[in-house]
Image (spheres, rainbow, N blue to C red):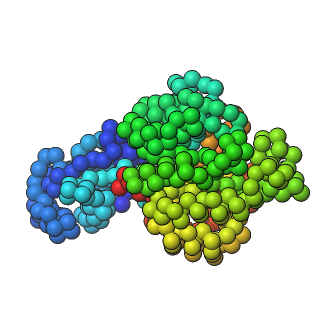
Amino acid sequence: MEITKNFDLDRAVASDAVLELKPQVRFLWQNAAVHESLKNAATDRFKVPFEDGYDGLNMHQARRKESGWWSLVATKGYCRLDFGDEEGLRKGFDFWLDQLQRTADGRFYIPKERWTVKNGKVVKKMKKIDMHIHTYGDISMDQKVAYMKEMMDLRGYCGLGFMGCLRNSVGFHLDSNEVTMELKRRIPGCFAFAGLDHGKDFVEQAKLYMEQGFDGIKMLEGKPSLYRFWGTGYEGPRMDEFFAYAEAQDIPLVIHNNDPRANWDPSHPKADHLREKGWYYGDGDVPSQEEFFQMMEGVLERHPNLRVALSHMGFYYDNLPRVSALMDKYPNLYMDLTPAVEVFIELSLTPEATREFIHKYSKRMFIGTDTNTNWAPGSRVREFNDQKVRMMEVFFEGDEPEVVGGKYPVAPMHIEPEILEDIYYYNALRFMKKI
């Protein structure tokens, strides 16, 4: 079986998320017996009668070369599978049927898929969502949109998760929620998480944001530099009222709950750099890393059904038994594997335990890059994004260890493709209750 250069299901269904198919077969080939057997094979596979028709699964004789070959095409778009003979046709038909999925109401559809040839074999390119992109930056909305569309094209992303951030370590970004929603509106397949305004009622904001079409809420209040600014984190009656509402309404929350342990270490070689950024906490003006862990775990204890994704693996990447216990106890707890670069460096040190963790919780973790919309060519933002993307490629798909960017040692975990696609794509949708 050969895939032609123009076989690209992404393009075939570019106008919609899925290509709807009726249980029909149109097969214009002189061999009626083969036609009937293929139709029966489809009927047997899906337990739904497949009939001849013009707007269903479309098989036809496109043209014939000297060797003789046949094509299988989608009725919308130009993608095509080519086969050399009847045996190839049957294999191709099975291949095509394997792509069919059902909606909850029983309709057939083909998800957006991307295929390539690797080592002489047809393989599926992984669908991916970058679920952690911040929306601040001193550039125009048109530039933000252009950069993000370029990122999707270059990285092969099906969607992006934009995280509103009204206040970070640098300062206020009061238009961040509006920018976040506008990006979702202008870039198909993307998602928007709103940040909380501390000058307004949290619960009323949550109601409004969800009514406006946000997909969840991003919380940065657990970052120690912001604890320093607000004088509080996720504790207290105001926060508990908000968490109780989010729990009752099953609102997805992406929560930053801590920072790397090195940020409390006065002997760390980058301590002065961390001080400049406001991320050094060894002077005793904020709680310890352990106290931040306890604050977050207290929230989960009081609100055990919260739908939460902890950013940067919650900074538990060097304590897999502890985070495993949390995952076991709280079924709606997800891990956002967005690097902080320490995530994959630390996990690489314990490959067997890491693989076991990934396999056990394979449907409750997803990826992101923590980049921002000011993704200008040649910028430090893009350079660092390139390095983090490479770290994830080596960690999940690589064959050999690599020191990424000359300073980030990462080891490959050799994760199976079906698990990778959950982590790269489907788990983000599960977290947001999109599937």
Q: Is residue 324 left or right of residue 260?
A: left
Residue 339 visible in the picture: no
Q: Residue at x 82, y 40 (%)?
A: 276
| Nearer the observer, 316 or 409 | 316
Residue 275 lies, in percent from the top left, at: 83, 44
The residue located at (71%, 63%) in the rendering is 290
- Residue 3 in picture, x, y percent from top left: 38, 53
Quarter of the picture containing the N terminus is bottom left
Q: On the rendered structure, is 317 left or right of 282?
A: left
Residue at x 43% of width, y 51% of height: 245
Q: Position of residue 159 (x, y in %)?
A: 46, 44
- State whether residue 328 appears in this view: yes
Q: Is residue 349 left or right of residue 308?
A: right
Q: As rendered, which of 407 and 39 lies closer to the eye?
A: 407
Residue 184, x across and y down, in percent? 44, 36
* Left-right relation of 348 to 109: right
Q: Nearer the viewer, residue 381 or 163?
A: 163
Quadrant of the image occupied by residue 262? bottom right
